[in-house]
Amino acid sequence: MKTEPFWTDEFPRPDDMSVTNELPSSVDVVIVGSGYTGLNAARVLAKSGASVAVFERNTIGWGASSRNGGMATPGLKLDISKIIKNYGAELGREFWQASVDAIDLLDTIINEEKIDCDWHRNGHCSLAYKQSHFDEMEEYAEWLDKEFGHKKTLVAKSEIRNEIGTDAFYGGLSDETSGGLQPAKYVFGLATAVGKQGVLLYENSQVKPIKKTSKGFQVSTSNGTVHANEVIVATNGYTDLLVPGLRPRVFPVGSYIIVTEPLTGDLKKILSPKNRMFYDSKIFINYFRLTSDGRFLWGGRNNLSTDLDLIDSAEQLQKQMVSVFPELKDVSITHSWTGKLGVTFDLMPHIGCINGIHYANGYSGHGLSIATYLGTELGLMLTGQKDRSPFEEINTRMMPLYRNKTWFLPLAEKYHRFLDWMS
Ligand SMILES: Cc1cc2nc3c(=O)[nH]c(=O)nc-3n(C[C@H](O)[C@H](O)[C@H](O)COP(=O)(O)OP(=O)(O)OC[C@H]3O[C@@H](n4cnc5c(N)ncnc54)[C@H](O)[C@@H]3O)c2cc1C
C-alpha cells in the first residue's frame, strides 16, 4: 500500500508546467499558496492584465487541492437553516445561491480552460445513518424547495439500491446539481492554464515575512524578495504564522482517505449504479465514490488529528468501509493518505483583510467548488469587477486563548462523538 495520494500517483504534476526561478523586482499581486483559492484568484487577475506571482512552499497544488475527495456538492459546511438563523434570511439566501453558483463556476472554468479532469455531473446522494436523520432529510427537502426552489429527491430505504449497493442506510436525499472530478488533474490543469496566461509560478518557495512599505509590500521568499502592490494569502488548512492574526481564524483538521484496487466485473455498477458522490449523515462524516478507473474511494475520520499513522488510519477506514460494503472485504487497499482541512469556529468560509493583506479560507472540508468561488471572488474584487461579497460581510468567530496550538481538538472530538451517538 502506498502512503501517498492516489490522485498524484495516477496523475503526477505535468513536466511541462511553466514554473520558474527567476524573480522580477516587482509584481502587481503576490499570492501565497497554489491550491484552488490561489490559482483561481490568479486566473481572474491575470485575465484582467495584472502581473501575478504565486509562491508555493512545496510543489504546485501540493495541499488539500490534490488530496481531497473530488466531490462538488451544493451548500456550505454549516447547514443552510443554521446559516439563516445566524446571519438572517437575506445573507443566508446569498450564501446558498453562491454554493450552487460555485458548482456552475467550476463547470465553466473546466470548460473554458479545457481542463481534462474526469469532471462528471452525475449528482450526489447523502445517506441517512439513522431513521431520525432520514426524517430530518424529508423535512429539509421540502423546506429547501419552498425557500429556494432547489429540488432534491427523497430516496426511501426500499429504493436505496437504485442509488447505492448497500442496505446500511435508512434512505437518502439525491441532488442532480453535484459532480465529481480528479482533484490533482483539476489543480494541475488550472496551474497550466494560468501559467499560459503569464502567471509566474514558484515551487519550493516558502513566503516568510511580508513587510508593509509605503508603496505596498515587500515579500521575502525562498527565491528572493519581490515588491507587490497587493498580497493574497491562500493557505487555508496549511496556514502558518506568516500573517499574525490569520492563524487564530482558521485551524487545521485532518481528513483521511483510502482507495481500493480497481473493482472487477459488475461490482462498480452494483455499488454505485449512477456513479454518484456519497456522504453519510454522521458528524464524523464518511464520504465515498468510485474513481474514474473503477476504484472505491472511502474517506473520513473518527479523530480530528492531522498526524495519524497512515497504516493505522487505512485499517480503521477499511473496517468502516467493509461494515457498509461487505463485498469489499477481500479487495486490496492500494493508497492511504491525508490532508488538512482549514476549519473556522463558525464553520463559515471567509474573505477578509489583515493589515492590507487579503485572504480567503475556512471551507471546513467543503472547498472544491467553494475555494474555486472565493478565489474568483477575491480576484474580481481586487480588479474592481465586483464591489462586495457576502463572505467578507460576516465576522469571524475566534476562540479565546487559541493562537497556534489546537489544544481544544481532543475535547471537540469527544463532544462530536457524543453527538453522533446521541443523534
Ligand atoms: C482529505 C480531504 C478531503 C476533502 N474532500 C473534499 C471534497 O470531497 N469536496 C470538497 O468540496 N472539499 C473537500 N476537501 C476540502 C478542499 O480540498 C479544500 O477546501 C480546498 O482544496 C482548499 O484549497 P486552498 O487552495 O484554499 O488550500 P490548499 O489546496 O490546501 O493550498 C494551500 C497551499 O498553501 C501552501 N502554503 C502554506 N503556507 C505557505 C507559505 N508560507 N509559503 C508558500 N506556500 C504556503 C501549502 O503548501 C498548500 O499547498 C477535502 C480536503 C481534504 C484534506
Image: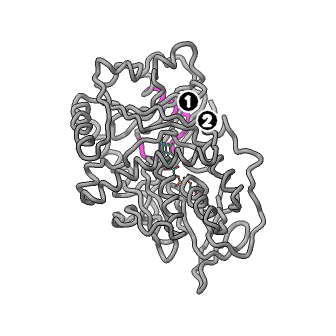
Above or below for 261 versus 367: above
Residue 412 x/y as whole percent: 34, 50
Label 2 element class = helix
Label 1 element class = loop
Q: Earlier in the sequence, mark 1 or mark 2?
A: 2
Q: How is the image coloured?
A: one colour
Above or below for 372 versus 22: above
Disc 1: which residue: 291
Asked if the residue under mark 2 is in contact with the one under mark 1, i.e. CB atoms within 8 Å, the reply is yes
Residue 358 x/y as whole percent: 51, 69
Q: Most extreme residue toward the top, as rendered?
A: 265
Is residue 31 part of the magenta span, yes or no?
Answer: no
Q: Nearer the viewer, residue 369 or 101?
A: 101
Say which amino acid is labelled 2: Phe
Seen at 48% across and 57% down, the residue is 374
Magenta stretch: give its range: 303-319
**Could you give the CA–CA distance between mark 1 and mark 2, rounded to whole angstroms?**
10 Å
Say which amino acid is labelled 1: Thr
- Let me know if residue 204 appears in the view: no
Q: What's the mark number on residue 166?
A: none
